Image: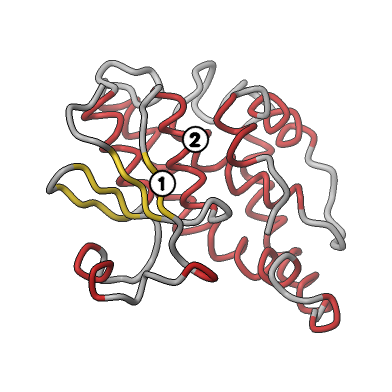
Amino acid sequence: MPDTKLTIWGRANSVNVQKVLWCLTELGLRYERIDAGMQYGKTREAEYLAMNPNARIPTLVEGDFVLWESNSIMRYLCLAHGRGTPIYPDAPKQRASVDRWLDWTLSTVQPVDRPVFWGIVRTAPAERDMIQVQRDADAAVEVWAIADRLLSTRRFMEGDQFTLADIAVGSYARRWLGVEGITRPAQPNLTRWLAELGNRPGFAQFVAPPMS
């Protein structure tokens, strides 16, 4: 266990906060979470900006150490408090293979996820432009087809072992398969994999609840 208290700043309905909370659960680490962002405010206050000049969430604080960017936080937690954990392998090639999926969520998944999620979940029904949302969903289909094809040959994103890749990609996949009101093709391998992730306590507690 860490000698200094871990604190996570960020609201629980943020996908990036959810990733970190899921990772903390996998590592069995104790922490405190402070609501911040959207309706909770705080991210534009001087105290918070001194920690995270991006005014975004999550931010990790451990003693006098401050870290932002959810994927970087997950990597740090594994390196600092989970040495030898199979969710972030030590072997360079295996670690790089995990890391690429964390990067993929930022470069490829997030840009197609955001317009669909925000267009439905965070837009009032009367204000939704479902024609545009469906166009955005059609673009997302092509991205998620990559994961669906991959998962036809393996149990998890990087083979038979659950890793940070599954946390990073799985948190977004829950949103993709969970939004209602769009037309999307069946993606059975993605659906099978997400159902298996649902058995993990961190997913069940932080990712599975109703989206908001």
- Vertical order, 111 against 100 (above or below): below
**Circle 2 Cα neighbour tier, 10 Å, few/some/many (<14 / 14–19 / ≥20):** many
Q: Secondary structure at mark 2?
A: helix
- Vertical order, 212 against 5 (above or below): below
Could you tell me the amino acid type at mark 1?
Arg
In the figure, is residue 77 to the left or right of 208? left
Quadrant of the image occupied by residue 4: top left
- Vertical order, 115 against 151 (above or below): below
Residue 191 position, x and y percent, is: 75, 35
Q: Secondary structure at mark 1?
A: strand
Residue 147 position, x and y percent, is: 62, 41
Could you tell me the amino acid type at mark 2?
Trp
Q: Can you tell which mark lies on residue 22?
A: 2
Residue 151 position, x and y percent, is: 64, 30
Give the residue at x 45% y 25%.
26
In the figure, is residue 70 to the left or right of 15? left
Given this view, does label 2 or label 1 mark the residue nearer the observer? Answer: 1
| Residue placed under numbered mark 1 in the picture | 33
**Circle 1 Cα neighbour tier, 10 Å, few/some/many (<14 / 14–19 / ≥20):** some
Give the residue at x 22% y 27%.
2
